[in-house]
Amino acid sequence: MMGIDVYKTIEGIGLVPVVVIDDAADAAPAAAALKAGGAPVMEITLRTEAGLDAIESVAGNVSDVLVGAGTVLSLDNAIEAVERGAKYIVSPGFDMKVVSWCIERGVAIIPGCVTPTELLAAIGMGLNVVKFFPANIYGGAEAIKALSGPFPDIRFLPTGGIDLDNLEDFLMPQVIAIGGGWLCPRKNIKEKQFDHITEICAKSVDIVKSKL
């Protein structure tokens, strides 16, 4: 996926599976399962020791799946993730050092922003795509609609508390894509139930595409 526009790719898919990997050997099969379900993108979190190895595995073995790093909490995290093959960085909050480093190097960055002050910081850095996390705690779809009043050019990636039951609520022009762990459950990965992951993704993709 050399030369791709990460944001356009994510928008085209409409979903960003948030993936927690405990064994890096499961990363490539999980990526293949997501692709088979119509969601060839994954945000591999750095919540486990296997996270970086998992990113490297997908980047090296499943080139047609867009892989990024999530739960990036420091500049060191961001640097190593990109060195391992991450094509984009997602952070639960707004870290000026991480954002600046990514912008300087042309790496797509999606920082977490849920308040007007954080959104102003993102806009000040030239960004217009932010993560809205945890979406269910910070007001969900209604909060995104309200924030879009004063910030009409911001596109949100809501994540947290979203699943098949309420996915449709977040399908609105202000949302670039919808993220979440329901698309690739950690339990299914550990138990190597990759067919189930494909099934969940396919159902979610159908919901997203039906509203386009």
Image (spheres, rainbow, N blue to C red):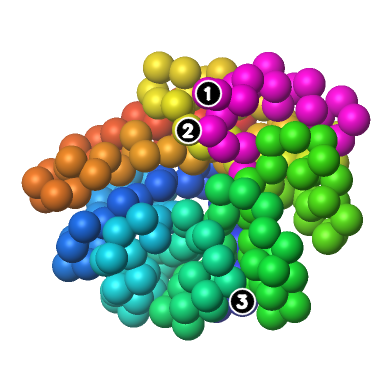
Quarter occupied by the C terminus: top right
Q: Where is residue 202 drawn, in percent x and y?
A: 34, 36
Q: Which residues are magenta?
A: 131-151
Residue at image x 69%, y 69%? 97
Residue 138 is one of the magenta-drawn residues: yes
Asked whether the residues under the numbered discs 1 and 2 touch, taking CB atoms below 8 Å apart as contact, a structural biologist would say: yes
Question: Looking at the picture, does residue 162 appear above or below residue 191?
Answer: above
The label shown at residue 3 is 3
Q: Where is residue 12 drawn, in percent x and y?
A: 58, 48
Q: Where is residue 160 drawn, in percent x and y?
A: 48, 33
Residue at image x 21%, y 57%? 22
Dot 1 amino acid type: Asn
Q: CA distance from mark 1 to mark 2?
A: 6 Å
Asked whether the residues under the numbered discs 3 and 2 touch, taking CB atoms below 8 Å apart as contact, a structural biologist would say: no
Viewer-closest of 134 and 108: 134
Q: Does label 3 or label 2 sit earlier along the sequence? A: 3
The label shown at residue 160 is 2
Q: Secondary structure at mark 2?
A: loop
Viewer-closest of 160 and 176: 160
In the displayed structure image, the side of residue 16 where residue 12 appears, left or right: right
Residue at image x 68%, y 47%? 130
Dot 3 amino acid type: Gly
* Residues packed near mark 1 inside 10 Å, few (<14), some (14 to 19) or many (20 plus): some
Q: Which residue is mark 1?
A: 136
In the displayed structure image, the side of residue 53 where residue 174 appears, left or right: right
